[in-house]
């Protein structure tokens, strides 16, 4: 090739013209370019994305190639390796130091499918390549163990540096802890608030979570002491609100959403998932029946100026898969597979945007 000298500086200068579309800064400023190697007639480098579920992968790849062809040489072969390093907005903190993002999954009303959405979002994030855990803190009916076929399992205890630590259950590549794995200390049938809060604190303080990109917390419906315990115990990256399009569900979801915005809680809302958005019979795939109303979740998101993460249809397989203990998103090429994967991708994207733009979170000081 002529007298063209290609060096790392020229490549970096070219790549500094490429914007990360969500974060609105260039890839070099965001420190997303690594391992540049210039060879004869070619250049190789790695783009470190903010999440393996990044929906903009191919766009970024194309724009990098175009920028190098335009600013350095149209003849260079550009080989791009995409990897991911999930971002965090945490500032240390004594508990769960290896966990990058704690995501609260909440609903206003019971039975809207919060646990179903939690387990499927977790599975979809895991399948995209992320390290994922779930804490089931829903004392009203801890259903995560059943949905993961883990209801017969019991967490074990290990000694680490002279301390007893709980090992979360591992199922399908996901780490799980549930209030359903624990027996209430006074063998009461029903978990009462203070005991459940104590159990939740243990899930953070005495559980060996190791390294996780996303730890999803399945909260009880409505507003409760558990919500307060959560935000006081660990820094929460953000909350997801699950609702159905029904008027009664939306009214309660509004209260749930407003709770996270109270100054003493102050957890950013990452978005709304509308579950049971419509029914499509298998034999009539073009027909959508809006059994519980239409577009309510999207309107709720608009009203509060928070992202809409997606709509999940009513599909018989979602219920069956939950009962069988294998989250429905594992059937990848299905209506439910696509719906949950799209919502998980959008959630990962909103987490990356939140981590880049908002200030760091810390535990909420106890207000007396
Ligand atoms: N999109 C869907 N399509 C079909 N069935 C669904 C869907 N979402 C949830 N279900 C079913 O609805 C029932 C309630 O769901 P789930 O237990 O997830 O609700 P929840 O909001 O977590 O309830 P709780 O108030 O007990 O916490 C379950 O049987 C589940 O399989």
Image (cartoon, grey):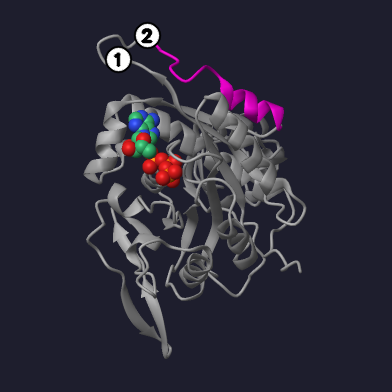
**Mark closest to the chain's N terminus, 2 or 1:** 1
Whether disc 1's CB lies below 8 Å from ligand 1 is answered no
Real-space Cα separation, disc 2 to disc 1, in angstroms: 7 Å
Q: Name the residue under label 1.
A: 281
Q: Are marks 2 and 1 in contact (CB under 8 Å)?
A: yes
Where in the image, quadrant-wise, is ligand 1 located?
Answer: top left
- Regarding residue 251, the answer to whether it shows in the image is yes
Residue 35 screen position, x and y as percent = 54, 54
Disc 2 residue: CB within 8 Å of ligand 1: no
Task: Give 306 or 332, whichever is nearer the viewer.
Answer: 306
Say what secondary structure mark 1 lies in: loop
Q: Residue 167 occupies which quadrant of the picture?
A: bottom left
Placement of 124 over or under 140, stated as above or below: above
Residue 43 included in the magenta stretch of the image: no
Where are the magenta residues, as a range?
Answer: 286-304
Using residue 151 as the reference point, say whether residue 124 is left or right of it.
Answer: right
Q: Which mark is residue 287?
A: 2
Give percent across and percent down for residue 17. 70, 36
Query: Dot 1, crowdedness within 10 Å: few (<14), some or many (≥20)?
Result: few
Seen in the picture, residue 33 relative to 204 is either above or below; the reply is above
- Residue at x 54% of width, y 51% of height: 103
- Residue at 61%, 49% in the rendered image: 238
């Amino acid at each position: 090739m002529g007298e063209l000298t290609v060096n790392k500086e020229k490549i970096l200068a070219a790549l500094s013209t490429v914007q990360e579309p969500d974060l609105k800064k260039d890839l070099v400023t965001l420190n997303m370019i690594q391992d540049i190697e210039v060879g004869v007639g070619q250049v190789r480098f790695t783009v470190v994305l903010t999440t393996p579920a990044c929906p903009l992968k191919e766009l970024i790849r194309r724009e990098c190639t175009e920028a190098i062809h335009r600013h350095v040489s149209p003849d260079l072969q550009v080989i791009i390796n995409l990897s991911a390093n999930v971002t965090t907005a945490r500032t240390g903190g004594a508990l769960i130091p290896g966990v990058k993002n704690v995501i609260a999954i909440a609903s206003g009303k019971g039975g809207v499918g919060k646990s179903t959405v939690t387990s499927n979002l977790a599975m979809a994030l895991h399948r995209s390549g992320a390290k994922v855990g779930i804490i089931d803190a829903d004392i009203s009916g801890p259903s995560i163990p059943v949905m993961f076929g883990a209801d017969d399992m019991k967490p074990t205890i290990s000694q680490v540096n002279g301390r007893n630590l709980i090992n979360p259950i591992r199922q399908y590549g996901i780490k799980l802890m549930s209030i359903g794995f624990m027996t209430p200390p006074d063998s009461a049938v029903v978990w009462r608030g203070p005991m459940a809060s104590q159990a939740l604190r243990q899930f953070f303080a005495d559980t060996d979570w190791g390294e996780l990109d996303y730890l999803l917390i399945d909260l009880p419906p409505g507003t409760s002491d558990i919500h307060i315990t959560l935000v006081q115990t660990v820094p929460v990256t953000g909350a997801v609100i699950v609702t159905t399009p029904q008027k009664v569900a939306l009214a309660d979801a509004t209260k749930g959403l407003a709770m996270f915005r109270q100054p003493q809680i102050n957890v950013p809302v990452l978005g709304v998932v509308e579950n049971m958005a419509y029914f499509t019979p298998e034999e009539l795939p073009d027909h959508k029946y809006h059994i519980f109303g239409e577009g309510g979740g999207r309107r709720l998101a608009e009203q509060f100026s928070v992202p809409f993460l997606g709509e999940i249809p009513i599909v018989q397989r979602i219920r069956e898969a939950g009962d069988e203990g294998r989250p429905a998103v594992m059937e990848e090429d299905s209506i439910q597979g696509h719906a949950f994967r799209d919502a998980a991708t959008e959630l990962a994207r909103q987490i990356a945007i939140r981590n880049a733009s908002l200030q760091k979170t810390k535990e909420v000081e106890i207000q007396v």
